[in-house]
Image (spheres, helix red, strand yellow):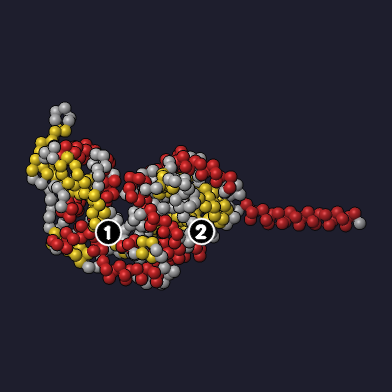
Amino acid sequence: MPSIHRTLSKLFALLVLVICLCVLPVASQPREITILHTNDIHAGFLPHEAFWIRTNPKPLVGGFNELAFAIDSLRHVRTSTLLLDAGDIMTGNPITDRVFKGAEGGGLIEMMNLMGYEGQTPGNHDFDISYANYLKLKAIAKYPVFSANLVDEESGLPVTGKEYVIIDKNGLKIGVFGLMSREFYELVSVGSTKGIKLLPPVETAKRLIALLEPQTDLLIALTHEGVDDDSVLATDTKGLDVIVGGHSHTRLRKPKYINSVIIVQAGSNAENLGILDLAADKNHHIVKWNGILHQLWYNPNRGTTAVTALVDSFKTEITNEYREVIGTLSSPWNASDGETAEGYYLADAQRLAANADIGFMNNGGIRKRLVPGPISKQDLFEVLPFRNNLVTFKVTGKQVRDIVLNDIEKRPGILVSGIDCEWKRGADGNIEIVTLLVNGKPVDDNATYTGAASDYMMGEAPRYLGIPIPTLTQLSQTVFLAVEQRIRAEKIISSTPAQRIRELK
């Protein structure tokens, strides 16, 4: 009997060994996930020309049909996927003016619902219409929306309702928290930031890392602050595994790797889908990773996707209204030293619409360069996609002089209307104003002049003009409408004005 027991014991031990040999390698296999990511879509739900291609006609790229097809295809071949967006879904196409489920631009969020997004942090342009409209957009989302450093001034709670989420994927607990750019107040109009407090991104990230590290296996920062600030975040913190970024529109064809943190970003305008494959060992350390951008080339033979019906519906509606030709640009608009005739034209349109003495346009507010040919309402919307109102204000001649000096010294990126200035630099290096005219007449330092600009630009008056914010008078039209009316009235545009603030050599 003892020999039988010994034999059975040996067989049992052998069986246990075999089971261990079979199970342990499987258990020790790295767990794989794929992060699919987008950022700065800017309402690009339709394909558009690939402007960087030299041949004509240029191929089309982007759009939500292509994006949905790519996402769905990858979900069929990857073990486990996580779909994230790093903000700025809004601003860039008239769909953002269309009310859907109570929110302007709500159709974009509904399409993201249909594509199965699993997390998003807001971008600055998602607040362009208003803080109230952003909250309506958030309410449509069926996926988590979160930001850790945007809080309500009164309650101190996140404006998104959440700072972070923890998502289970392939046996891994993945913590994801959101961050907004430290330049938020400079990027959004004063009216749309009222009631919102911005917390420092790096300090906020450190707090979230300390909170989430004990609860998670992998930690992702979903940021809308730009690749340079993402690099600083990676350097100044410890514990992050991945930063999925936005805001700077950077096409990171290969991820950056800084301080053991993988940084990815997918360009803009739904032209690419970012794909980051990760493998984590049993200790939840990333042991293998690879990141690429998948270019979303338009395929006219593509079958329908989950978003096709909604895309086609909005496309038809917008095309019917915005395809109208409102004028013609007869010759190329010149550019000089970063200033463009297009920008001067926009500044002039605001000054004339407001019956003001001087007008201003910020370079950053010009989002498309018009080329000779017909100008449709759609073209103009792509030039001026923001919901900026036209305002007027009073300044003295002395303040006009200060504005010009600020432009010469600091180059804040403004274009002027009604102002003509010649200046030179003296032997001591100081700036000397040689001539300064308003509407062809020498400036009187003691006189009062009426200025016109967008409410956004004047909300940032110290940065753009170098003077305190003046008292503003809101007019009953947008900057877009002022420019549209001028184009319709002129029909043929051929002006190529010279530089208006120029140095004498």
Tell me residue 191's x, y (percent): 33, 50
Element on which disc 1 rests = helix
Residue placed at 27% from the left, 50% from the top?
Answer: 455
Tell me residue 392's x, y (percent): 21, 49
* Dot 2 amino acid type: Thr
Res 251 seen here: no
Farthest residue, direction top: 428
Q: In this image, 35 relative to 44: left or right? A: right
Farthest residue, direction left: 441
Q: In this image, 451 relative to 254: left or right? A: left
Element on which disc 2 rests = strand
Residue placed at 79% from the left, 56% from the top?
Answer: 12
Report the residue marked by disc 1: 382
* Rendering quarter of residue 494: bottom left
16 vs 109, nearest the viewer: 109
Give the Cα separation between the discs numbered 2 and 1.
Answer: 34 Å
Mark drawn on residue 370:
none
125 vs 252, nearest the viewer: 125
Q: In this image, 399 relative to 105: left or right? A: left
Residue placed at 38% from the left, 53% from the top?
Answer: 131
Residue placed at 24% from the left, 61% from the top?
Answer: 379
Res 122 seen here: yes
Quadrant where the N terminus is found in the figure: bottom right
Mark drawn on residue 81:
2
Tell me residue 481's x, y (percent): 22, 59
417 vs 378, nearest the viewer: 417
Quadrant where the C terminus is found in the figure: top left
* Dot 1 amino acid type: Glu
Please rate how many residues cluster around mark 2, counting C-alpha atoms within 10 Å: few if below 14, some from 14 to 19, many from 20: many
Mark 2 / mark 1, whichever is N-terminal: 2
